[in-house]
Amino acid sequence: MLRRYLPESMGPGVAFLDFDNDGWMDIFLVNSGPCDFFQPAQAPKHALYRNDRKGGFIEVKGNAGIAPPKSFGMGVAAGDYNNDGFPDLFITAYGASTLYRNNGDGTFTDVTQKSGIATPGWTTSALWFDYDGDGLLDLFVCSFVEYNEDSQSGCISARGGKPGYCIPRMFRATASFLYRNNGDGTFRNVSAETGITRRLGKALGVVATDVNDDGLLDLFVANDTVENFLFVNRVGKRFDDIAFEAMVAFNRDGTARSGMGVDAADINGDGRQDLFVANLDREMGALYRNTGFGVFDDLSFSSELGLATYYLSGWGLKFFDFDNDGAIDLLLSHGHPDDMVSEYSPRVKYEEPLLLFQQQSGQFRNISARAGPVFQSAFAARGLAAGDYNNDGRVDALVGINGGAPLLLKNNAGMGNHWIGVKLRGVKANRDGVGAKITWSAGGVTRSRLKTAGGSYLSAHDPREVLGLGPAEKLEWIDVQWPQPANRRERFAGFAVDRYVTLTEGEGEKR
């Protein structure tokens, strides 16, 4: 009888990144390698595709030095940890994770052992962020559960005598990892001394954002079947989990949900970072509004998001302005983890639709019915990355499909609106500008956005920020509050609209 193993139901992750630094987003796809339950004769390789600048992609021969996976691949995080201007890659897995340094010549080198990041166990989402404000990107890695080939025993009776995937509730929780960048190509495991290991979870999604507006990046972690974590950054020295008192740990009834994908953004323009968690079917996606008083309001019941996601299982997602009107919208991917779910739960399907929510007058409206034919289909979707692959200023999406080919979604919306694309270049601050606050004025309207890190599920987004200007034909200015150690505010002006610009720390007018 065919056995089923939980890791095979969880991936894959996907990424947009400009690995050759030519100004066009390339694509990276995570694949599976050998592990204790999967021993292929020839391991499927990860896939790297170069943007041909004509709307298509060409697979990179030899994969630019990225070897076939040595373990069962899960997700990917892209970030410039050595500040050389080229994005590096960290690949998570059930088994050994891998760190690839971008050599700047179109190739990568496996530096996992040399770097000190030999992360064991089952890792899922990861992100690069500067938690201590030294100008170097550090690495947070989500750890899922204790698991091995024999862990599936006892998962048959719930499926009418057929083998099935175990619910993660039966597995032991684990501590996630935080690695501090030493600045010499190596990292130090600071998980214990920063307080990360004090909380055992079943982490699947993470986003780095500033929930209390103190200039330091905090971590919101989505856990499966146990409470979520909200690690608040205490002066770059330690993290305290305040999820319970902030009311984002459980649902309104005090029950843990099955959190998977996450993201953060200021959805209502009040300057505070709000949160979203994608959950399993019958749990609803959770939209949390930041009140500014250390607590969040769960808006799931009062918005269309709750009803639309009730029978769906959410994974990858992204807050972004899909139509460039200046308001933050939301894209969600779905798919149940169990391909046999309809045999015991008729209202729930394995393949499920993508959903697009447009913000209208402060409310998220489900516009999936008119968002294009792809939204009328169903998929076993997992990771989701957002990025403008054709440089037309309209943010596109890449969706990983469990057991199938990925989806590349071209955005044709908002053609009547204008935009400005921003690539940040830190000097004293980290090169990617992670943690910077961008404020812009166009047509007499001022808006702001925090450059967060991570988010979604197993995936990495285009590092550029596309700022929607609506009908405004002129951009007055852009202000950048650079993160520590720069900690300076600069104004940039004189840009025409509908194009990408690079904003370099130190080249703007000090404010």
Image (cartoon, helix red, strand yellow):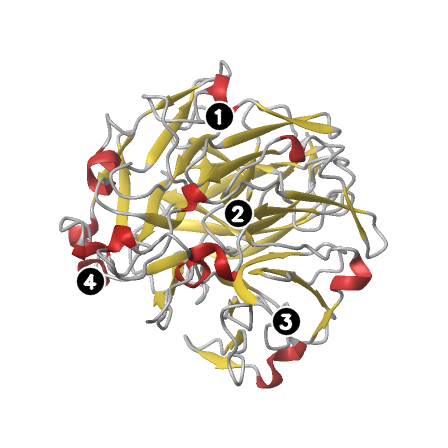
- In the picture, the quarter occupied by the C terminus is top right
Q: 136 or 91: which is nearer to us?
A: 91
Mark toward the start of the polypeptide (1 vs 2): 2
Position of residue 474 relative to residue 488, above or below, is below
Amino acid under label 4?
Answer: Ser
- Of tags 3 and 4, which is closer to the observer? 4
For marks 4 and 1, give the CA distance.
Answer: 36 Å
Q: Residues within 10 Å of mark 3 (few under 14, many from 20)?
A: many
Which residue occupies 39% across, 25% down?
289
Which element is circle 4 on?
Answer: loop
Q: 69 or 121: which is nearer to us?
A: 121
Amino acid under label 1?
Answer: Gly
Q: Residues within 10 Å of mark 4 (few under 14, many from 20)?
A: few
* In this rendering, position of residue 228 left or right of residue 379: right
Query: Residue beneath label 3, please?
Result: 20
Q: Picture quarter containing residue 298?
A: top left
Query: Residue beneath label 4, please?
Result: 377
Residue 145: give its label.
2
Residue 83: give its label.
none
